[in-house]
């Protein structure tokens, strides 16, 4: 059966579905489930897949090509469909669903048995003689807890085995730094060591806050019982716990328990970054690289569902970098799993917004690592995206500037920055052809029209003019921006356009769009980037203007000679390269140039003889390579 006939048959089947909530399962020829979705009205949602393909994103079109049949399950409500969808996706792992591959697995705290046991972080339970705490999600928090416990309770961090290695060596530096009790040198008894190990395990179980309270209570009891040695030991442990806690920066003061989510997009990939805060401290970070979906609110909802479906601890507050689809359904799902109220927030200011921005920077950094970009480049592009509220990371930026002398020799320069670096192979020059005289707005309209005409012709190549920029910067203010917006609308293009505004000292001070200016603060990386782009496009357009102006002046000097027109002037310049060489050439050398007669040679020689010393040695490039 042909693909079009298959889609028609599937659409007819979909049109027979009820207008009820439920879950649908797309299957390939072998009967394997390749996509699972939920719907408020099954008939409406499923039939859309098998109608016109023009409105579907590439990923959906590809999925539909492989659908041979579908099944469905009716539910009593949209919420039940959501829960069932999550469960079925977790069981079947369909190819075309967004899947968060939790390759970190679970982590454990491994406790080797006495005598002389110890603690360590482990990825699996592979020792029958040991006991384990966990599992925990995120190796970061487990490793940190074990390291803290060993430092506080002076447990050995070396590879020595006890009691085998007791008395065989002198204490290491950690003993003198009060980070190890040195069982290797017999500095602690077995009974005291085992008591210390038990206290370290309780510290990990209860966390620093509860462990601190318990030790303070024991210290008071020991002091009241006049057991000053034990009280002093507990005092030292309390101080160690406080010292460890003070090392960590409390980045959240108002909401002690919360998760922060942010998405960074580039090309067809997205990175979801997660920061987990417990007791006001950052206790874990995770990130996932996934395929980009067209509908960002729907994508956020899906990612959160997948994340918390992986047996995650759900905090009372979740911060997001943007809206989610059907927030009520998502919130109900989270609260039923948590058993308590949960808050979803897209912060607009204050500490919470700072945390989301920090999370977004982490996502951009990880995505930059994925694509092989340097960290500093990723950071500045992320700053620029946030400052201008761009829909995607501005990986490919085009900048334009107009240059002329009182309306003469009108030219424009286009420079390209890719991943925050100049891409000189993509630079282009434009000689203004549509009119003469001074009209910067008209010049900018002509240049952008010619540029996007070339895009219409070459877009299949994906390179040079065949690639759309992520951002267009114009050297100028609101007038330049308003002049070119109708050009983009006429081509049906949605490319962000901003003007680069200078202060009275000709330094970049702001960018503008829609009549509003966005100030760029000195010292920010984005300020350096935009200043560099503006200086580079100005330099490039000025250089082209000077080249054209000099070429025209030189050409005009030659055309002043009787019998020499523009065509013969270009032939002479092409052959001799400079006016100075033409001026000093013999008549025979001049006549040897194809297209130049002996009479022309005599006229040229006589002209320069009568004007000796007046004309400088101008260089020119009559072909003007790279001009558009």
Image: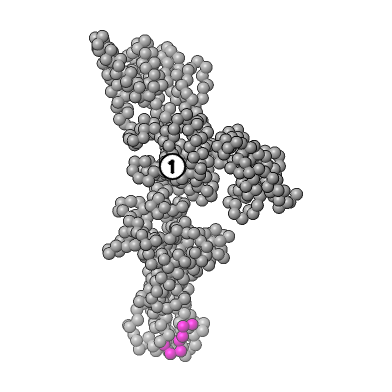
Query: Which residue is at 55% across, 64% downward?
Result: 456
Q: Is the residue 445 above or below the residue 509 in the image? A: below
Q: In which image quadrant can residue 540 be found?
A: bottom left
| Residue 293 located within the stretch drawn in magenta | no
Relative to residue 456, is residue 561 drawn left or right? left
Relative to residue 210, is residue 64 drawn left or right? right
Query: Which residue is at 52% across, 17% downward?
Result: 128
Query: Which residue is at 45% across, 14% downward?
Result: 113
Give the secondary structure at mark 1: loop
Query: Which residue is at 40% across, 78% downward?
Result: 437
Number of numbered discs overlaid on the protein picture: 1
The x, y position of residue 615, in whole percent, is 35, 81
The stretch in magenta equals 561-567
Q: Is the residue 408 above or below the residue 500 in the image? A: below
The x, y position of residue 87, in whole percent, is 58, 33
Residue highlighted by disc 1: 320
| Mark 1 surroundings: few (<14), some (14-19) or many (≥20) residues within 10 A | many
Q: Is the residue 123 above or below the residue 383 in the image? A: above
Is residue 247 at least partly visible in the picture? yes
Of 286 and 86, the residue lying toward us: 86
């Amino acid at each position: 059966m042909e693909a079009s006939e298959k889609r028609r048959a599937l659409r007819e089947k979909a049109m027979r579905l009820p207008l009820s909530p439920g879950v649908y399962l797309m299957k390939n020829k072998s009967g394997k489930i390749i996509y699972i979705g939920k719907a408020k009205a099954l008939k409406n949602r499923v039939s859309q897949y098998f109608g016109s393909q023009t409105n579907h994103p590439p990923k959906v079109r590809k999925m539909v090509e492989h659908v041979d049949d579908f099944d469905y399950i009716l539910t009593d409500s949209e919420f039940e469909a959501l829960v069932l969808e999550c469960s079925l996706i977790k069981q079947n792992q369909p190819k075309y669903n967004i899947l968060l591959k939790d390759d970190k697995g679970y982590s454990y705290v491994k406790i080797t048995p006495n005598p002389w046991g110890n603690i360590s972080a482990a990825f699996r339970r592979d020792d029958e003689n040991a006991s384990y705490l966990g599992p925990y999600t995120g190796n970061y928090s487990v490793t940190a807890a074990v390291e803290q416990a060993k430092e506080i309770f002076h447990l050995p961090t070396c590879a020595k085995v006890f009691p085998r290695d007791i008395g065989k060596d002198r204490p290491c530096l950690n003993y003198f730094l009060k980070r190890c009790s040195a069982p290797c040198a017999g500095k602690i008894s077995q009974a005291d060591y085992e008591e210390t190990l038990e206290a370290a395990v309780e510290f990990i179980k209860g966390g620093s806050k509860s462990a601190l309270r318990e030790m303070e209570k024991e210290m008071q009891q020991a002091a009241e019982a006049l057991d000053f040695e034990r009280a002093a030991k507990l005092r030292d442990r309390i101080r160690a716990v406080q010292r460890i806690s003070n090392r960590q920066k409390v980045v959240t003061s108002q909401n002690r328990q919360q998760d922060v989510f942010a998405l960074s997009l580039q090309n067809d990939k997205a990175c979801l970054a997660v920061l987990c805060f417990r007791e006001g401290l950052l206790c874990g970070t995770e990130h996932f690289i996934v395929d980009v979906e067209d509908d960002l609110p729907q994508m956020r909802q899906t990612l959160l569902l997948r994340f918390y479906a992986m047996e995650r601890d759900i905090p009372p507050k979740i911060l997001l970098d943007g809206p989610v689809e059907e927030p009520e359904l998502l919130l109900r799902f989270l609260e039923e799993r948590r058993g308590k109220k949960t808050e979803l927030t897209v912060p607009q200011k204050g500490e919470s917004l700072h945390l989301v921005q920090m999370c977004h920077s982490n996502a951009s950094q990880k995505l930059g690592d994925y694509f092989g970009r340097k960290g500093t480049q990723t950071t500045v592009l992320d700053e620029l995206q946030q400052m201008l509220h761009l829909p995607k990371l501005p990986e490919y930026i085009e900048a334009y500037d107009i240059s002329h002398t009182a309306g003469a020799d009108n030219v424009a320069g286009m420079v390209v920055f890719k991943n925050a670096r100049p891409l000189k192979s993509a630079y282009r020059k434009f000689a203004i052809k549509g009119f003469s005289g001074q009209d910067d707005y008209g010049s900018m309209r002509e240049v952008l029209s010619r540029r996007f005409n070339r895009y219409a012709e070459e877009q299949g190549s994906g390179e040079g003019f065949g690639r759309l920029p992520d951002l267009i910067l114009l050297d100028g203010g609101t007038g330049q921006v308003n002049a070119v917006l109708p050009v983009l609308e006429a081509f049906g293009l949605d490319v962000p356009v901003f003007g680069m505004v200078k202060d009275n000292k000709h330094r970049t001070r702001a960018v503008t769009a829609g009549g509003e200016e966005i100030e760029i603060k000195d010292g920010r990386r984005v300020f350096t980037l935009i200043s560099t782009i503006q200086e580079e496009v100005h330099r490039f357009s000025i250089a082209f203007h000077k080249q054209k102006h000099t070429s025209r002046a030189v050409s005009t000097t030659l055309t002043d000679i009787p019998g020499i027109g523009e065509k013969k002037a270009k032939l002479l310049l092409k052959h001799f390269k400079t006016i100075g060489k033409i001026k000093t050439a013999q008549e025979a050398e001049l006549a040897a140039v194809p297209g130049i007669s002996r009479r022309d040679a005599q006229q040229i020689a006589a002209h320069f003889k009568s004007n000796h010393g007046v004309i400088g040695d101008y260089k020119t490039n009559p072909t003007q390579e790279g001009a558009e």
